[in-house]
Image (cartoon, helix red, strand yellow):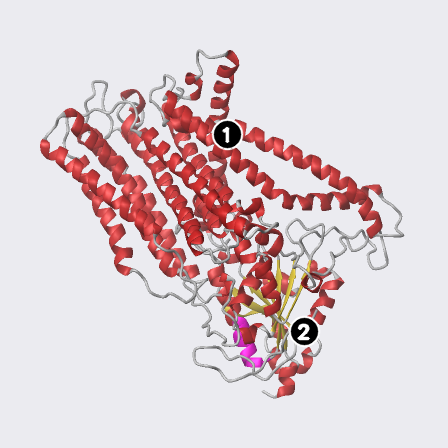
Amino acid sequence: MERDTADETALELLVHGVGGTTPEAMLNDPRTVRVSGDDTAAVYRRADDADAEERPDDYRGKPVPEAYVWCNLTSGNGSRALWLLLLPFMVVNLAHWMRPNAHRRTRTVRAYGLLVRLVGLSLTVLLVAAACEVALDLVAWQCAGTHACAEGRSWLGFLSVDAHGHGGWWSQPGRRLALAALVPAALTGLLWYLSHRTWGAYESQQPLPHQPDPEEEAPTNALGRPGFWYGRRLVARLRAAHTAAGLLTVAAAVGTSAARFDRESGGPVLLDVLGRILDGALVVGTAIVVWVVCRRGRSEKRVDRTLDRTLVRLLPAAALALLVLTFLYAGWSRPEWRSHGRLPGDATFGGIVLVQGAVVVALAAVAHAIHRRARDSRAALRGLGGPATAMLACALGGVMSGGVAQRVADWLDGSGTPGAGGTIEGPPVLLSWQASVIPPLLIVVAVVCAVLAQRTMRLKRREMATVATDYPGEHEDTARTSRIAGTRARAALTDQAPMIIGAVSTVTLLLGAGALTGAWATHQVPGRAAQGTYDIVEGAAQTAQAMGSWLIGLGFILFVTWGRRAYRDASARRTIGILWDVGTFWPRAAHPFAPPCYAERAVPDLTWRMATWIRTTGGRLVLSGHSQGSVLAAAAAWQLHPTIRRRVALLTYGSPLERLYGRWFPAHFGPAALGALHRQVDCWRNLHRTTDPIGGPVRLPGEDGPQVDHPALKDPLAYGRTEQHPLPAPILGHSDYQADPVFAEERARLLARLRPEVPGPRPDGEPAAPQGSSGRSSS
């Protein structure tokens, strides 16, 4: 390629944000062609630009636009609806990456990651235990063992007993439990399958080969390390451990019930011995699972392609074998065994809640210790964002498990009320206590929302005066001013998210502790436990129990309805995809059953595209990211070889890099990380609006701040009707940044500052980088 051709080559690589879009909309042209990629994620150009490199004269003074479309990674086919089941796992995985920034605190950082992984393990056990509660306790033990409940349910006929307590071969309690246990075992298998399948579809992409530059220091930010976006070894190890934990939970639910009967009834010595052996095997298996989870986590300094094949295969297989042996043991004939009352679910769920609370408190202590050594005034909740988020994950898991159990119990009990004289005892008492704390929690949420509404109204009044100064000389329109000021005030609510999450998490922890204490102290549902006390206490307890049961049931119905709609409706799937866009950016480091990390596909896509294009043309490249696309753009820029990274300009708009990611993920997007990114790329410019509820300034300290952040864009572009805007200009908020003339001006300035170079030779295993470096130009 001739040098004058390379000198004129420029590319603008557009990366869209949350919710997705089409290449036609991104490129503003109905005729587009795919130049690289597949149906899941691809790079597109306008049809007229397909051979742009062959016609450089046609593109003098303007870049060739390309659009990277990745929305199908989070909102593709109907199977994405199943990801709703994984919501608590996704939230706890976020908590892993919310660690405060640490300087040379390796042991404390490892302790933080270990505690989050233990919370994730408890959520897997909770989900499987909830499935066991429904299938084993409510259906197989209580309903099938009670003639009044099983009567009229033909599908339970072969499991049930008659009015005299007699039945067929499957009616013995151990056999009923073994058969019903296939449901939670199948759920565990489904989780394993989804994790394994999505790994191959999303996260198995090979990162860009990375050779360190001897003239540059090792990357201090983890996002720049070669193995950050390739966590195959850890995910496989955690997948094996969590699968084994799920199978061991099922085995414990079946085997301990039979073993307890054998010990109490004085049955055959052989069965008693077998029961004790199985109990011991469960203890050993649990210890091994915890040990695997506690092992050191991710290896990011290199691309770790090794796999602990023996562990990955042997651990789930051994747990499955133990489960099969437990089925055989429980299915042994015990004619005198009768089911009555409940299975010991209170102890199980109470133990899970107690462990979760203790681990979250320990996590908060570790996070506080890290934050205290390197204080960051912008970090959410003073470094406690991770523990607060982990607490919310536990609450979500509890609500989902309690909602399923409560609804199934109501359905089986018919017109009766479980635990209050109905045909069955119903779910464990603790689940009723947990449901009863939902009304007071909602009261706290309502108070917080009222406080925020009052603050928003005060801010709106202040903004009314600011709007007038932003549009001088305009004829005042009170309604127009009110709409603009209201939009600005509501956009500022995003900065209050830490207060909401902190308050909800704290109250959830306290109410959860109260529910656990009440359940263990009374062994009765709240309404019964309050009988005989003060009238106001009894009335409040009964009201909270009734409302909690109704609310948790409503939540379950809405959850199922949302999932069904997402399965059938692509637009609903895209809406849910927005949640996954934000929640699944990070690799699965704490929970292997979380929805897959799309960035482990998107970041290598972007880095490969940029590196190969610069190698081929030696031209200039502007990486243009909107909203979540700006986060992907920053992550991809960190992954580039330094000589290539210095040939890239970064243009971000509507970006949550500091406002959301910098506050909630300070270790990876804090001031030090973003300041380093500014120094490493050739140039960076960030656009934002005060009406944008998501994007904001990068807020780099000192002189770097004005170099990166453009002053807030005017929105709307015109207050009243003008020759350029004969109709009222819309308030754009988070969208259509390209419609502002400042966007084209800033892009042109970035292109003018980039200096083209001649492509250099290609080192072994590394895409060729241009010879020399453009150096950093001051902004």
Segment colored magenta? 609-618
Residue at image coords 17%, 28%: 263
Say if the magenta span includes residue 360.
Answer: no
Residue at image coords 25%, 47%: 319
Name the amino acid type tagged 2: Ser
Label 1: state its secondary structure.
helix
Q: CA distance from mark 2 to mark 1?
A: 56 Å
As displayed, is residue 412 above or below residue 493?
above
Q: Quadrant of the C terminus?
A: bottom right
- Chief secondary structure of the magenta portion: helix
State the image coordinates of residue 397 (x, y, percent, origin top left).
43, 39
Relative horizontal placement of residue 766, taking residue 124 as reference (left or right): right
The image quadrant that residue 139 belongs to is: top left
Q: Quadrant of the N terminus?
A: bottom right
Which sits in the foreground, 298 or 202?
Answer: 298
Residue at image coords 63%, 57%: 655
Which residue reaches farthest bottom?
A: 2
Residue highlighted by disc 2:
777
Relative horizontal placement of residue 338, taking residue 575 as reference (left or right): left
Q: Is residue 564 visible?
A: no
Name the amino acid type tagged 1: Ile
Residue highlighted by disc 1:
438
State the image coordinates of residue 509 (x, y, percent, origin top left).
48, 34
Specify few, some or many for label 1: CA neighbours under 10 Å numbering under 14, 14-19, or 20 or more.
Answer: many
As displayed, is residue 266 above or below residue 181?
above
Which sits in the foreground, 726 or 387?
Answer: 387
Label 2: state its secondary structure.
loop
Label total for image: 2
Which residue reaches farthest front?
A: 373
State the image coordinates of residue 459 (x, y, percent, origin top left).
74, 41
Specify few, some or many for label 2: CA neighbours under 10 Å numbering under 14, 14-19, or 20 or more.
Answer: few
